[in-house]
Image (cartoon, rainbow, N blue to C red):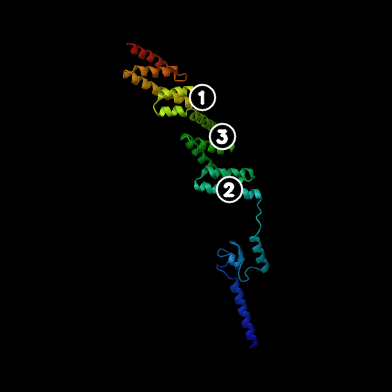
Amino acid sequence: MMKKTTALIAILLFLCSSLAAAHPGRTDSNGGHTCRTNCEKWGLEYGEYHYHNGGGKSKSSSSSSSSSSKAADTRSAAEIEADGYIWNGDYYLKQGSYYNALYYYFQTQDTGYSWKVNASNQSAAAKKVAEQAKAFYESDQLDKAKLYYELLGQDASYSKTYNVPANLGLIQERQAFLSAFANARWYYNQKNYVNAVLIADKKMKEGLAANKHAVQFMKDAALKLSQQAYSAYVEKDYANALKRYNVIANAEYAPADLKEGARKNALIAERQMKE
């Protein structure tokens, strides 16, 4: 009777210990598996490989396996930092945020681990940044265009491929024009071409004579003014015709052909006023 009682107690203890150690998940041929569910509840880390019910070769091998799964990260601080930048770059690339993607890829340059960046991903991001920079320039979003080209300029090969120095020069030229010609452009939009030409000529004398945007503006404004002068002449409003022709004729930076035509037409309008 005593022997039966002892045996029963032993079986119950075994079953209790097995139940206490058990948790969800099938085991492999070695009697173990990787924890994926409620790991903290069982005193494990997510993704930790461990054995069930004495599985594995021995207690020491189980301990060794557990220790290896918790082994310290052997990467240097610089490599960990670089990997973080790369992760961010890849993430933003997938999101279509190309400026941010390229920015983070470039951040790896100071870590010594830029070689870990996927070259195809970085090139794709750079190409998109260049396309966006051009679009910003064409829509006069010059601050954004400058920012995007400056990012590309951080890499010598991209700077050459996408003509960064030249494009930054174009942005600077355009910014100078927009700033100096703000009033002239306003008058132009109001169809007051007299003031548009007068202000444009003044600004060009102040240092923007070689600015291609200023040159084009003067050409457009002087042509519009010449057309107004002709319309006034046809309507026999000789005084207004003469006034407009004289503005063109006296504008130093008006196109030469328009200046010459304005001088001749001014004389004709003046004669008509005397008759």
Q: Residues within 10 Å of mark 1 (few under 14, many from 20)?
A: many
- Which residue is tagged 3? 160
**Amino acid at circle 2:** Ile
- Which residue is tagged 2? 86
Q: Nearer the viewer, mark 1 or mark 2?
A: 1
Q: Which quadrant of the figure has residue 234? A: top left
**Amino acid at circle 1:** Leu
**Amino acid at circle 3:** Lys
The answer to whether residue 257 is seen in the rendering is: no
User: Is there CB contact under 8 Å for labels 1 and 3?
Assistant: no
User: Is there CB contact under 8 Å for labels 1 and 2?
Assistant: no
208 up-or-down from 44: above or below: above
Q: Residues within 10 Å of mark 2 (few under 14, many from 20)?
A: many
Residue 9 as seen in the image, left or right of residue 259: right
User: Is there CB contact under 8 Å for labels 3 and 2?
Assistant: no
Instruction: Please provide percent x and percent y for residue 134.
Output: 49, 36
192 up-or-down from 144: above or below: above
Instruction: Please provide percent x and percent y for residue 219.
Output: 43, 23
Which of the pair 237/109 is nearer the observer? 237
Sequence-earlier tag: 1 or 3:
3
Taking the spot 48% from the left edge, 22% from the top edge, the residue there is: 202
Q: CA distance from mark 3 to mark 2?
A: 24 Å
Instruction: Please provide percent x and percent y for residue 127.
Output: 51, 40
Q: CA distance from mark 1 to mark 3?
A: 28 Å
Per the rendering, the mark at residue 208 is 1
Sequence-earlier tag: 3 or 2:
2
Q: Which quadrant of the figure has residue 157? A: top right
Per the rendering, the mark at residue 121 is none
Residue 274 as seen in the image, left or right of residue 208: left
Taking the spot 65% from the left edge, 66% from the top edge, the residue there is: 62
Instruction: Please provide percent x and percent y for residue 175.
Output: 51, 31
